[in-house]
Image (cartoon, rainbow, N blue to C red):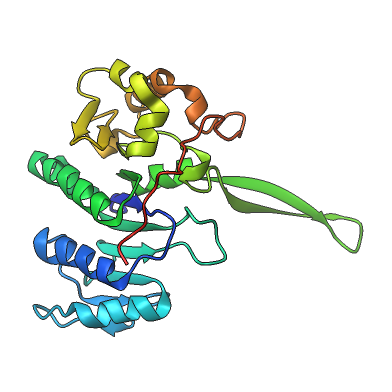
Amino acid sequence: MPIKSVETQISLPPGRLSGECVREFLELALRGYGWFEPRRYGSASLGKTIEPGRLDLAPLVAHYEERKSLCIAARTDRDFIWFSPSPADAPPHAGDISWITSARSASNASWRAAHAQQVLELMRLVQSPLALSGLETDLHAKQWRLVHKSIPTEDEKEFTFSEREFTVRDYSQGLAGLVWRNFFGPPFLRMFGQRLGTLPVGCRESLGEDVVLVQPYVLPTEAGTEAGVARERELMSLLGSECFYDHERHTLPTRRPVLDALGHPLH
């Protein structure tokens, strides 16, 4: 049976993520939090190696500054971090940093408590307005959909194929849904307003003054279950269904965050 993975996506504000900011992020994630022992790095391929116990951040940062992207992985593909800032020719809010690890980690209460604080610290470091964490399969099911298409051929027949498309391209278009953990920064706190206070006890936690964690259920593995889906729908209804993508009608949210006040990553 494939290992279930938890993916944490930290969305980036517009602007180039600096090498110094990448270095500080890695210093926290790999040395401070000890997410995993890094052994490989690169971009499209992980062809460069890291000697065990001898982590030097300088070549990793240099790779990021040259390629404008960076992936650092453990010995296996179970654990990795992917820096994927928005390219110059892409929408300005499309960049993010992803961390993948085994879903088994989340069964530990102390890990879950540490995860919330770590994500908060990293959001503040990169000035992120939004972070999402949940089963990788659940995140991708909400953020993408399979569209069946057909094109005419020379013999007047049709060639049919399937293609993945975004549901919500990035957070400027609103939210694709709720997942296990939803870290809402200032633009989303303003969007939801007093509705956040209507959420059931245990589903909302203020992390300082600028971030609120909305968590429909205790464990990420509850995503997709009957109870988990019901709780997500309940919370989205309380927060305002117009803030979320409609997966039945395939329509974008009609209420979206105002992003004028967003800062920029460290330069």
- Tell me: 148 left or right of 165: right
- At x 24%, y 62%, the residue is 79
Q: Quick check: 47 above or below 263?
A: below
Please provide percent x and percent y for residue 128: 33, 50
Q: Tell me the quarter of the image containing the C terminus.
A: bottom left
Please provide percent x and percent y for residue 115: 17, 46
- Residue 46 visible, this angle: no
- Residue 25 visible, this angle: yes
- Tell me: 3 left or right of 35: right
Depth check: give the residue in front, 212 or 248.
Answer: 212
In which quadrant of the rendered view does residue 190 lie? top left
Q: Quick check: 86 above or below 241?
A: below
Please provide percent x and percent y for residue 83: 35, 65
- At x 28%, y 77%, the residue is 61
- At x 87%, y 55%, the residue is 157
Please provide percent x and percent y for residue 117: 15, 45
Depth check: give the residue in front, 25 or 208.
Answer: 208
Depth check: give the residue in front, 71 or 128.
Answer: 128
- Tell me: 55 left or right of 129: left
